[in-house]
Amino acid sequence: MSPQQAGERDARESRGSVVPDGFGDDPLPSDAVLRTHVFDAADLRRALTRIAHEIVERNHGADDVVLVGMYTRGVALAERIAAAIGSFESVEPALGALDVAFYRDDIGLRPVAPLGPTEVPDISGKVVVLVDDVLFTGRTARAALDALHELGRPRAVQLAVLVDRGHRELPLRADYVGKNLPTRTSEDVRVRLAEVDGDDGVDLWGTPEREDERR
Amino acid sequence: MKHLLSIDDLGGRAGIEAMLDLTDSFLEVQQRDIPKVPALRGKTVVSLFYEDSTRTRLSFETAAKRLSADTMTFSVATSSVKKGESLLDTVQTIDAMGVDAIVVRHGAAGAPHRVASWSSARVINAGDGCHEHPTQALLDAFTLRRHRGPSLDGCRIAIVGDIRHSRVARSDVMAFHALGCELTLVGPPTLMPERLDGWPVAVTSDLDEILPDVDVVYLLRIQRERIGQALFPSLREYSARWGLSAERAARSKPDTLVMHPGPMNRGIEIAGEVADSARSLVTEQVANGVAVRMAVLWSLLGSGGPIV
């Protein structure tokens, strides 16, 4: 283990072992309580519609745009944004799916599993919009930038997320945000999508004991 | 799973299927323009081969390199084994250098198990004597699943040839049986194991009888070095009764697949035309071998937890 990795593990441990890192589907703690329904299905649809319009506006169309969803829910979100763009523009942007497991910086520190096969069309010279459900530490987005870099040389990379919950550990920001949601690190944001979870919505979960640990 | 010494280490059907699912992700990496990911950066994989090998050793080394691990190769011919160093001392020497995984091939059954007990590294069995060759069985199952999957339930497979001396056959029987296949072992009685108690297989010496019924013919290499043991009269006679000639292959179902673990003896257990025909999966087996070994290395060194 490199000193850098060791430092990272220490930071993680000092912060509390149950801190979610926004990656994968770690089960919620057994004592988790639902704090708020942040989005219902209609809110979620409106946020995605707005993001779709913003992407087209900012890029002056969708001709050169490739929407690349990050597994698992980012893939479904990218498909929905593409369909939304297709409904009001003459073209539907190209779609891709990206698995960042092999590019993560916490391999060996916690269980990491590939979530699905990477399928990305030719991105050279295109504007890639990375799509994910929740932006938290930024480590998944960093891994995605590394992964993209090996698949081609896009003209620009932008980031679209349904929820930005803060607590960034890297100098990254999202270009398109469905909802800025201030949270505590001990809390957990869960996005539900019909394609993956059966229905649509966004929930904020917390645990009672850890409220006094807030930082 | 700490080591992969036997197909049993995967924990039955669910574990084998989880490993095959994982392999899909690595097959995609293999097909990229830059077929390399940084997943195992900083890990060291050493191949400790006491027997000759082309595809298994190269396949493991390619897999490790495509995961960005460092590789070291140990070959008996140029090592201190020539000066009489024992397996224990060799393993301790390698272990002292701080390696993360050791890929072992050895002529003695159980040697990888001994290595695992001596070393703190993860150990992968790349073939031990006439015992097991688990990554070969995984790549065979993966290859077959891509053609007959996702489920292999009820797939009828004939494994033909020298079952007795074949570690491939042992691991394949375990893996294919766990995945729900129906297995028949075919070959001269002298090349069958002395006891087959508990093997989930049917046995016959008549290839022509079962050929029209099977979905897959899996041919094993005739180990020429064993001809001296008088287990069968001649290569010609073996080839006439158990070799898959073009005429014989034509009597199987049109979609019957042909597999072989390599290296092939063309004209003995398999005719050249059959090996190169559309029904042959031989080169695909080799290609998939790299992806399977990437999945195994990742599971042992990178996943950070159980794969099932």
Image: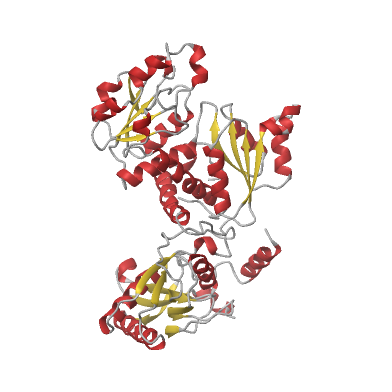
| Res B192 quadrant in image | top left
Q: Residue at x 41, y 43 (%)?
A: B284
Q: Nearer the viewer, residue A167 or B221?
A: B221
Residue A188, percent across and down?
A: 47, 74
* In this view, B89 is above or below A167: above
Furthest residue in direction right, as rendered: B83
**Left or right: A123 as drawn, with respect to B129:** left
* In this view, B103 is above or below A36: above
Furthest residue in direction front, as rendered: B273
* In this view, B37 is above or below A11: above
Residue A196, percent across and down?
A: 34, 66
| Res A178 quadrant in image | bottom left
Residue A191 visible at all: yes
Q: Nearer the viewer, residue B15 or A151?
A: A151
**Left or right: B189 as drawn, with respect to A10:** left
Q: Residue at x 59, y 36 (%)?
A: B104
Q: Nearer the viewer, residue A125 or A159?
A: A125
Residue B23, percent across and down?
A: 44, 50
Q: Nearer the viewer, residue B116 or A150?
A: A150
Q: Residue at x 65, y 70 (%)?
A: A11
Residue B40, percent across and down?
A: 59, 55
